[in-house]
Amino acid sequence: KNEVEQSPQNLTAQEGEFITINCSYSVGISALHWLQQHPGGGIVSLFMLSSGKKKHGRLIATINIQEKHSSLHITASHPRDSAVYICAVGSWGKLQFGAGTQVVVTP
Amino acid sequence: DAGITQSPRHKVTETGTPVTLRCHQTENHRYMYWYRQDPGHGLRLIHYSYGVKDTDKGEVSDGYSVSRSKTEDFLLTLESATSSQTSVYFCATRGQGSDSNPYEQYFGPGTRLTVT
């Protein structure tokens, strides 16, 4: 059983819609990461958080340590947001990854 | 972005041959990681390094070895490649406690390896 579970596995949205991706984990962590992987394959870090909420532009990430749950929200989604979003949890730098959520935003 | 390069970017090899993948970084990061990414499994840690000549195994280390003789280079070797090692391999780096984002990992562009 994967210790990091993401939902949904796939998501299709129309441009402008609000998108939420969820991540639940079962291990103790020092930080949770949200990563983005574009069709070309490159992986970039979007957020790293250990408590509360962070916001970068249209992206918002929240974490509830007690419930071992995090959400990634995309507001006013755009086709360029189409990518795989990956949740990863870590302790002392070693990460365990979720399987990813494939997001497709249609015009 | 951290300066991380991987070579080669694509490789096709035959079963039983040795293969070495290289990760090179220019950020003077202490920690380096090798992951493999497979459909249905996500990213999985193969080996990692916490300093020059200091390495340890990850969750899928069987069939792989690593070496780090200098800070900037982390090599992953498949001693005798098998078809189950067909995958996309990512290298990542991380700074250390004194850095501004000590736990953030920076990923290389990936190497697509096919073992026939």
Image (spheres, coloured by chain):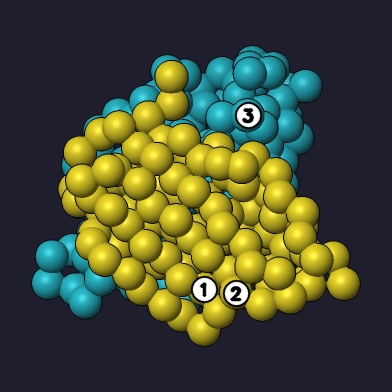
* Near-viewer residue (B81 or B94): B94
Q: Position of residue B20 (x, y in %)?
A: 53, 38
Chain B visual colour = cyan
Q: Amino acid at mark 3?
A: Gly
Q: Amino acid at mark 2?
A: Thr
Q: Callout 1 environment at 10 Å: few (<14), some (14 to 19), or many (20+)? A: some
The residue sitting at 49% across, 48% down in the picture is: A22
Q: Are marks 2 and 1 in contact (CB under 8 Å)?
A: yes
Residue at mark 3 to residue at mark 2: CA–CA distance? 28 Å
Q: Which chain is yellow?
A: A
What residue is shown with label 2?
Answer: A75
Q: Are marks 3 and 1 in contact (CB under 8 Å)?
A: no
Residue at mark 3 to residue at mark 1: CA–CA distance? 26 Å
Q: Position of residue A20 (x, y in %)?
A: 56, 58
The secondary structure type at the circle numbered 1 is strand
Q: Is residue B59 visible?
A: yes
* Near-viewer residue (B84 or B115): B84
What residue is shown with label 1?
Answer: A59
Q: Residue at the bottom extreme?
A: A57
Q: Is residue B34 visible?
A: no
What residue is shown with label 3?
Answer: B40
Q: Callout 3 environment at 10 Å: few (<14), some (14 to 19), or many (20+)? A: few
The secondary structure type at the circle numbered 3 is loop
